[in-house]
């Protein structure tokens, strides 16, 4: 059968001074639990190896800022996660801050995720496209959201990989609010879209929406699962992290738009679900059969800059 037994490894807060090795030990504990429950794929959150550092302003070249990026994947501290996953035969999705050097010798920084197969091979890499927040220090805010300062817009595009029996795509956090994210992957055949998120409960520019964070999280993903006939696997970093409350409610959403499993804490918590790739056909072959029913010549304006 073409299916994945999915574990969503929600993380509670990661402290500013928590070491990479301490965090990796938490990931391995959740991975081991997932193995005991029969999972062969585990999703971890966005920026899963560190605290959500865009909440603080750092000058360029600050040593603490530099400490949050991975120069290698796997590196010395993350290798044990790759080893354990391969030993258990579990594939995984992991979000992290990536620092790389291009051919011209320039440093490039991305908010990145990878898909690793059950043998421990990196099958796909995605660099976040919709970067929220702002670039400069906005001191009126109770906390910053400096993704536009610390990352470049991703250069990988939205893709769909042949992965462990299905077609799997990736996104990161704010990407999940945009319909184009899912549609561009679904047009490439995606049957499952995996994403991690760090979503503050308080949105300083529009605080009157604070009570809607959970609703907006689910409404966009449930609608998108249905409209694209995809499984959506969504994993939060949750809880009160360095004084900032982050949304939990990690979930597995079926192609019908139904939530089939959801986290009930804002701590490290594993939820599981059986995701049958064939169930995407109920949607993809009927109401949202792209070949039969889409009218792309009427949609030209949405691809204009
Ligand atoms: N990490 C991330 O993309 N978070 C945003 C926060 C809201 S915009 C400042 C999100 O879309 O959940």
Image (tube, rainbow, N blue to C red):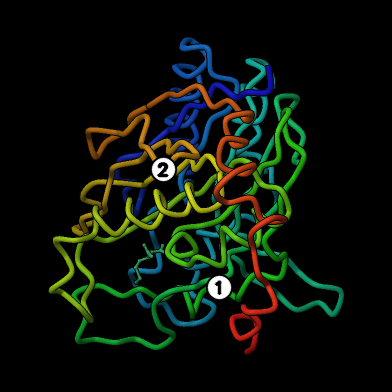
Which quadrant would the N terminus be assigned to in this image? top right
Q: Where's the C terminus, which quadrant? A: bottom right
Q: Is residue 168 left or right of residue 138?
A: right
**Picture quarter containing residue 112?**
bottom right
- Measured Cα–Cα span from mark 1 to mark 2: 32 Å
The residue singled out by tag 2 in the image is: 257
Disc number placed over residue 151 in the picture, else none: 1
Looking at the image, is 73 positioned above or below residue 200?
A: above
Instruction: Examine the image and state in which quarter residue 128 appears.
Output: bottom right
**Is 222 left or right of 285, judged from the image as shown?**
left
Task: Report the label total.
Answer: 2
Image position, residue 50 (x, y; %): 44, 51
| 37 is higher (above) or lower (below) than 129 | above
- Residue 223, horizontal then vertical, whole percent: 41, 53
**x 18%, y 69%: residue:** 209
Q: Is residue 259 above or below residue 197?
A: above
Q: In the image, what residue occupies the spot 23% across and 33% down?
A: 264
Q: Nearer the viewer, residue 271 or 116?
A: 271
Q: Is mark 1 within 8 Å of ligand 1?
A: no
The reply, left or right, for residue 201 in relation to residue 126 is: left
Cβ of disc 2 within 8 Å of ligand 1?
no
Image spot of residue 71 (x, y percent)? 67, 56
Specify the quarter for ligand 1. bottom left
> How dense is the environment of label 2, judged by Cα within 10 Å: few (below 14), some, or many (20 and up)?
many
């Amino acid at each position: 059968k073409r299916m994945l037994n999915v574990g969503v490894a929600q993380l509670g807060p990661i402290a500013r001074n928590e070491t990479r090795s301490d965090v990796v030990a938490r990931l391995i504990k959740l991975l081991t639990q997932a193995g005991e429950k029969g999972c062969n794929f585990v999703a971890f959150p966005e920026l899963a190896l560190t605290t959500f550092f865009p909440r603080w302003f750092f000058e360029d070249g600050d040593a603490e800022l530099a400490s949050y990026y991975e120069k290698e994947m796997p590196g010395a501290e993350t290798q044990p996660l790759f080893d354990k996953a391969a030993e258990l035969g579990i594939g995984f999705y992991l979000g992290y801050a990536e620092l790389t050097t291009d051919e011209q010798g320039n440093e490039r920084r991305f908010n990145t995720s990878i898909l690793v197969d059950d043998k421990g091979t990196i099958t796909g890499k995605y660099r976040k496209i919709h970067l929220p927040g702002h670039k400069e220090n906005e001191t009126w805010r109770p906390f910053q959201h400096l993704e536009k300062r610390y990352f470049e817009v991703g250069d990988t595009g939205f893709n769909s990989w042949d992965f462990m029996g299905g077609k799997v795509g990736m996104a990161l956090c704010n990407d999940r609010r945009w319909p184009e994210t899912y549609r561009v992957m679904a047009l490439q055949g995606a049957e499952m879209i995996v994403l991690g998120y760090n979503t503050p409960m308080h949105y300083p520019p529009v605080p009157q929406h604070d009570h809607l964070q959970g609703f907006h999280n689910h409404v966009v993903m449930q609608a998108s699962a249905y409209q694209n006939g995809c499984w959506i696997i969504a994993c939060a970093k949750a809880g009160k992290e360095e004084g900032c409350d982050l949304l939990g409610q990690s979930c597995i959403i079926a192609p019908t738009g139904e939530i089939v499993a959801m986290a009930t804490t804002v701590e490290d918590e594993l939820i599981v679900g059986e995701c049958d790739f064939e169930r995407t056909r109920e949607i993809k072959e009927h109401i949202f059969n792209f070949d039969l029913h889409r009218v792309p010549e009427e949609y030209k304006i949405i691809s204009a800059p």
